Image: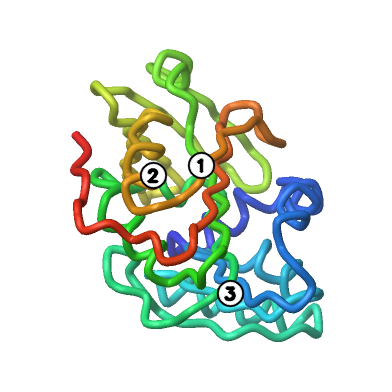
């Protein structure tokens, strides 16, 4: 089983309608939306029912699943294979990066810069990040489940790193995530020239960050995060 298919099955029980209802007020009627790290297209499909959507992901298998999900729901979105560590050569009104997308980056500076550059003036970036207390909650975590398929999941923490191991049949998947403080993101985004709001949302494990690009505000000084 590919990681994309495993991910797709493990993510199927999330209340995507609730997430979409939370995000939708930040999107205006004729906005173009980039779903950054769109995965297998659950949220992309909901967004595409109301808006012009571009889905980006660095896993080709994920995009195949997303394309199938869009077709099954009779909606359309542009899908591109793209690493968010690289420049986004598109302009958009809104960027959404939910379901842990930013938790996979050790250094957040370049990806924040790429998001900023891709936004039109007054564009909005919406994303989620783990709350720092997750590091204590997840350390030495183990679970064994039978649905939606038999798997064993273990988690260990090393400083700000979350190390996941998922075992399915004879295959083991190792995943690394990072927990950065809200102030790290706020510092980078404000240095670029964004108004930043940090709020709670549907997932109680996470902070939600809403960053609005102020017109003509890109600063020459980049702030490096630790």
**Callout 3 crowding tier (Cα within 10 Å): few <14, some 14–19, many ≥20:** some
Name the image quarter holding residue 150: top right
In front here: 122 or 2? 122
The relative height of residue 151 versus residue 125 in the rendered view (above or below) is: above
| Residue drawn where x is 65% and y is 69% of the image | 44
**First reached walking from the N terminus: tag 1 or tag 2:** 2
Q: Residue 63: percent from the left, percent from the top?
A: 51, 76
* C-alpha separation, residue under disc 1 versus residue under disc 2: 7 Å
The relative height of residue 53 versus residue 129 in the rendered view (above or below) is: below
Name the image quarter holding residue 174: top left
**First reached walking from the N terminus: tag 1 or tag 3:** 3
In front here: 187 or 162? 187
Q: Secondary structure at mark 3?
A: helix
Q: Which residue is mark 2?
A: 190
In front here: 22 or 222? 222
Q: Which residue is mark 1?
A: 196
Is 125 positioned to the left or the right of 112 in the image? right
The relative height of residue 211 versus residue 92 in the rendered view (above or below) is: above
Is 31 positioned to the left or the right of 197 in the image? right
Q: Residue 128: percent from the left, percent from the top?
A: 54, 42
């Amino acid at each position: 089983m590919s990681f994309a298919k495993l991910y797709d099955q493990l993510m199927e029980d999330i209340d995507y309608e609730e997430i979409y209802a939370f995000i939708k007020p930040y999107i205006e009627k004729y906005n173009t939306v980039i779903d950054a790290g769109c995965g297998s297209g659950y949220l992309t499909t909901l967004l595409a029912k109301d808006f012009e959507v571009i889905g980006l992901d660095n896993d080709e298998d994920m995009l195949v699943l997303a394309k199938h999900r869009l077709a099954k729901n009779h909606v359309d979105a542009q899908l591109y294979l793209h690493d968010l560590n690289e420049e986004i050569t598109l302009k958009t009104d809104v960027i959404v990066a939910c379901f842990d997308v930013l938790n996979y980056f050790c250094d957040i500076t370049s990806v924040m810069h790429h998001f900023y550059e891709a936004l039109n003036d007054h564009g909005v970036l919406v994303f989620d990040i783990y709350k720092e207390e997750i590091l204590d909650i997840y350390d030495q975590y183990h679970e064994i489940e039978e649905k939606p398929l038999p798997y064993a999941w273990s988690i260990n923490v090393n400083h700000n790193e979350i190390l996941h191991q998922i075992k399915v049949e004879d295959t083991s998947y190792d995943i690394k995530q990072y927990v950065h403080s809200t102030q790290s993101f706020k510092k980078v985004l404000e240095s670029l020239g964004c108004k930043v709001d940090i709020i709670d949302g549907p997932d109680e494990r996470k902070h939600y960050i809403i960053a609005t690009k102020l017109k003509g505000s890109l600063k020459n000084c980049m702030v490096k995060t630790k």
